[in-house]
Image (tube, grey):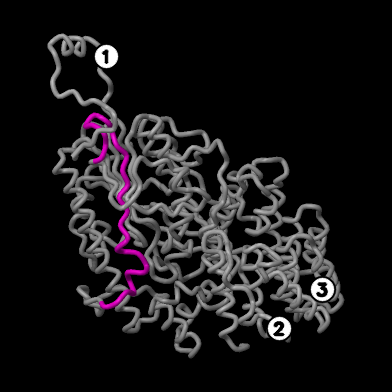
Amino acid sequence: MLRSFGLVTLYCLSPLFVVAAEVSDPKPVRPNILWITSEDNGPDLGCYGDTYADTPHLDALAAKSLRYRTAWSNAPVCAPARTTLVSGMYATSLGGHHMRSGVKLPDDLTLYPKAFRDAGYFCTNRSKTDYNFADGDKLAGWHENGRKAHFRDRPSADVPFFSVFNYTISHESQIRNKPHTLVHDPAKAPVPAYHPDVPEVRRDWAQYYDRLTQMDDLVGQVLSDLEEDGLTDSTIVFYYGDHGSGMPRSKRWPFNSGLHVPLIVHVPSQFKDVAPADYMPGGLSDRLVSFVDFAPTALSMAGIKPPSTMQGVPFAGAHTGPAKDFIFGFRGRMDERLDRVRSCTDGRFVYLRHFYPDRPYLKYISYMFQTPTTRIWKEMFDAGKLNEIQAKVWQPKPLEELFDLQSDPDEVHNLVNDPAMQQQLETMRSAVKQWMIDIRDLGVLPEGQMHDLAEDQAPRTMALSTEYPITELIDAAWASTASWQSVDAEVLADNTALTQNDHPGLRYWGARGLTLSLMSHGSVLDADLVSQACETLTALLDDPSGNVVVAAAEGLLVAGDATQREAAAMRLVQQADVTQSSHPIAIAALNVIDAQRDKMGTQLDRINQDFPRKHKAPPRMGKYVGNLLERIQSQSVN
């Protein structure tokens, strides 16, 4: 039923009015746009060839629509992915790539709901927002936002709508909730090569597919609402998942398994002029698309020019742009655990660059370990019961990875050292590095340092200024992390020189490079070179940037003498105390303390039950500090 919002709907017209309408230029009919989103699921649907799936409504939608073979969510977890969706910008260019980071946005940034509203659309969201910035719900500007929001609430039938329906039934939390009576047979569940093939894992996969069937029923209901209201022929429909499945090594990881989502786009015949160029009912598009493209595409299909701030390229509508050679992914902090990864694909190959190669893919995250698969996987690793492929995620990472999805869809065979793949490797490596420069990637800074440098302004505003030396920072990040696999006197000298720079970001990468050198090659380096590196790191313990202190302290814990280790441990504990430092820096310090607990000495005793754990903090940051403290306190020295 339509509600009145102060607008008058004319149900009958006088002959004079009809004549006037006939001779005037008719107002163009604008499409309604419906986005249907499901959480934590990849393209594990019948219409994508998955024979284990039971998804009849989505299969029927796909039969009359266009599917995309390669669509990426850019981020493998909800909040940074939704930051990208609502802004049409990579979350890394806004500083919103860390899970629930609560960053400020520039004043002149237009989010897509406001762009639609300004064009006369009625905009509703039902109901998840989870935008990764401060005042996100207010800034988005929905007419209605909540569990009852519906396109049926628009003021009159001639007002076009943009509506989002988001379904949580397939979310990670619904894979593990009990009681649940399985419908899919776990004996037939498709278990990827990286997971152990045990009953607990098969049950989780079966329950995941059960949830997909339930999600499919919900999709059928909203499509039925369209049909019931006579809106099917006037509504463009997007269906997509918000990132890969909620199973471990999919969600939170920018492999194809964590980023690949289903995307089905249906365009009614009356709007064929704004359909993608390769649109065909039941067709499959090879065009590479990702979340950063969705908002500008929807605006383009409505005849609205996307705001100039949007970095995505419309793949349909009046403002369609050129096809892409690559689409990109990223990972930052996930809850309480730090990591920094960038990835890309050309549809066949997937490349990943790791900036924390010293840390395992999967570390203990309180929320993630509630899933039975995660727990049994780690228990089997600790017991030595996994094969090499299954054990990989619990160990340090290579600097780079390259996978061929055609022959290796599970992404388990790294081709970086294959002589035949060197040109492909260099092409994708260069593409990722240039993309980071082009978008002025804020993830090249540690989270705490990013906020310190931005001060009271939005991080994006700082990133666009001349005070943000993006090329130098990315060159430093690239060179410093390469210390993980190759170190000599020249490399150590280059990193030492960075530690003397005026910019804290460059000093951070200098400290990080020295630390990685000592971690990976300290036992074989000349003793004088090790001593010089430790002297440099000792001086950085008094650096004004907490992140520089944390990076330097880790290197000293690994390779310093007893006095240097004690000083480093003391500084780490100080940085971990949120009464003395910010929450992001405390999280960074606690990650190092946890990783190097056996080298912390008596300072580890200071991380006790009296350490402040409940305090006012940005969104969930206090909880993440508490999770790390609880983990450190509950574990004996390895």
Q: Considering only order in the chain, which callout, 2 or 3, is on the residue closer to the N terminus?
A: 3
Indicate the secondary structure of the residue bearing disc 3: helix
Taking the spot 81% from the left edge, 84% from the top edge, the residue there is 562
Q: Is residue 234 visible?
A: yes
Element type at mark 2: helix
What mark, if any, has residue 599 been given in the picture? Answer: 2
Q: Amino acid at mark 1?
A: Asp
Between residue 327 and residue 558, name the one nearer to us: 558
Residue 265 visible? The answer is: no
Nearest the viewer among 232 and 585 is 585
**What is the distance, in whole Å, between disc 3 and disc 1 at their CAs?**
77 Å
Locate the C terminus and report the quarter of the image it occupies.
bottom right
N-terminal of the pair, mark 2 or mark 1, is 1
Residue 334 location (% of width, % of height) = 52, 65
- Expressed as whole percent of the image width and height from the top left, the position of residue 111 reads 46, 40
Label pair 2/1, CB-CB below 8 angstroms? no
SS for callout 1: loop
In percent of the image, x 54 and y 53: which residue is there?
A: 96
Instruction: Point out the stretch of residues depicted in magenta.
Output: 153-179
Is 583 positioned to the left or the right of 229 in the image?
right
**Residue extending furthest bottom?**
383
Q: Which residue is mark 1?
A: 25
